[in-house]
Image: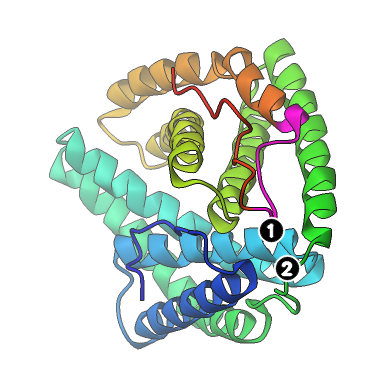
């Protein structure tokens, strides 16, 4: 079974077998991790693994047309978003060597959040959702997948173009966050689908770099607000890092035309025809 830090790798094996097996492994991993949350504490790596695995399962469900199941998983795992963000904030404070008083103030908030999740039985609700809804109802991919992927590529291309246009005109936080979520979906669906390893890994790696820039801005925006709420002594440092992250994030939309072009080409993904490359004849450039 793959470790939580590993990405999904799909080779030239039969697509339906690979999807079924990997999805079941991810479901089992999430259930095991959630049960550990129910039984004990909530370390950051465990919370992160649960959210990442669930997002990948959500992407597969959407790929297979199980939109209702995907929504259930998305709504379920969203309960962990605030806790995960607070845990990342804790790591950030440690990294910048914030005073212990600042760290203690945040630790108290994290404990409060964990208690709320237990009181509302959030972990049990996630467990039930993953147990009942995480697996696609139909993973038998056949030749109709090619037509489906063509449509999906067009949908992603149209959505990306709109998000990029809006974010370029007014690069506000919500617009950049929406762009980040769209990129995440494309990345996870790319990981699920078969394709030649080199071009596929190049595409995923490039999307992850963009996600990291946008994600950093989203994190720093939260940190900036929470620093004020907690009256932390390191607010000036947080403000400085937030401005730097905002500047980098606002430059992203203008640099994403390569992905829109790749989607528009119709060669980003492949179906059952393993002779077709993931990104078309020329692959993807990483620079």
Taking depth in this image into account, of 48 and 147 the one nearest to the observer is: 147
**226 lies left or right of 187:** left
In three-dimensional space, the C-alpha distance between marks 1 and 2, rounded to whole angstroms, equals 8 Å
Disc on res. 141: 2
Label 1 crowd (10 A; few <14 / some 14-19 / many >=20): some
Q: From the viewer's perspective, is residue 146 above or below residue 73?
A: above
> Is residue 195 a member of the stretch shown in magenta?
no
Q: Residue at x 71, y 71 (%)?
A: 72
Residue 218 in view: no
- Given residues 222 and 46, the one toward you in this image is 46
- Quarter the C terminus occupies: top left
Q: Which mark is residue 272?
A: 1
Q: Main secondary structure of the magenta part?
A: loop
Q: Which residue lies at the image location 34% right of the left edge and 44% below the top edge?
A: 89
> Which quarter shows the N terminus?
bottom left
Q: Tell me which label, 1 or 2, sits earlier in the chain.
A: 2
Give yes or no for residue 268 being in the magenta stretch: yes
Residue at the front extreme, as displayed: 275
Res 240 → quadrant: top left
The quarter of the picture where residue 254 lies is top right
Q: Secondary structure at mark 1?
A: loop
**Is 39 placed left or right of 250 in the picture?**
left
4 above or below 261?
Answer: below
């Amino acid at each position: 079974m793959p470790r939580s830090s590993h990405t999904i790798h799909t080779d030239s094996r039969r697509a339906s077998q690979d999807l079924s097996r990997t999805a079941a492994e991810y479901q089992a991993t999430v259930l095991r991790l959630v049960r550990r949350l129910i039984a004990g504490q909530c370390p950051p790596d465990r919370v992160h693994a649960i959210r990442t695995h669930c997002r990948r399962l959500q992407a597969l469900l959407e790929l297979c047309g199980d939109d209702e199941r995907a929504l259930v998983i998305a709504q379920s795992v969203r309960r962990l978003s605030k806790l995960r963000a607070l845990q990342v904030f804790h790591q950030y404070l440690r990294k910048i060597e914030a005073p212990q008083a600042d760290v203690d103030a945040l630790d108290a908030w994290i404990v409060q959040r964990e208690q709320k999740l237990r009181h509302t039985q959030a972990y049990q609700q996630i467990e039930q959702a993953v147990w009942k809804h995480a697996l696609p109802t139909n993973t038998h991919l056949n030749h109709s997948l090619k037509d489906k992927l063509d449509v999906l590529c067009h949908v992603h291309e149209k959505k990306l173009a709109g998000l990029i246009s809006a974010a370029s005109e007014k690069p506000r936080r919500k617009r950049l966050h929406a762009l980040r979520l769209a990129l995440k979906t494309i990345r996870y669906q790319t990981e699920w689908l078969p394709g030649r390893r080199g071009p596929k890994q190049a595409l995923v790696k490039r999307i992850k770099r963009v996600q990291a820039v946008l994600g950093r801005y989203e994190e720093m925006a939260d940190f900036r607000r929470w620093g004020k709420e907690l009256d932390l002594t390191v607010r000036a440092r947080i403000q400085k890092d937030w401005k730097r992250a905002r500047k980098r994030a606002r430059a992203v939309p203008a640099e994403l035309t390569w992905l829109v072009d790749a989607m528009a080409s119709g060669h980003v993904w492949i179906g059952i025809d393993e002779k077709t490359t993931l990104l078309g004849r020329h692959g993807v450039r990483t620079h």
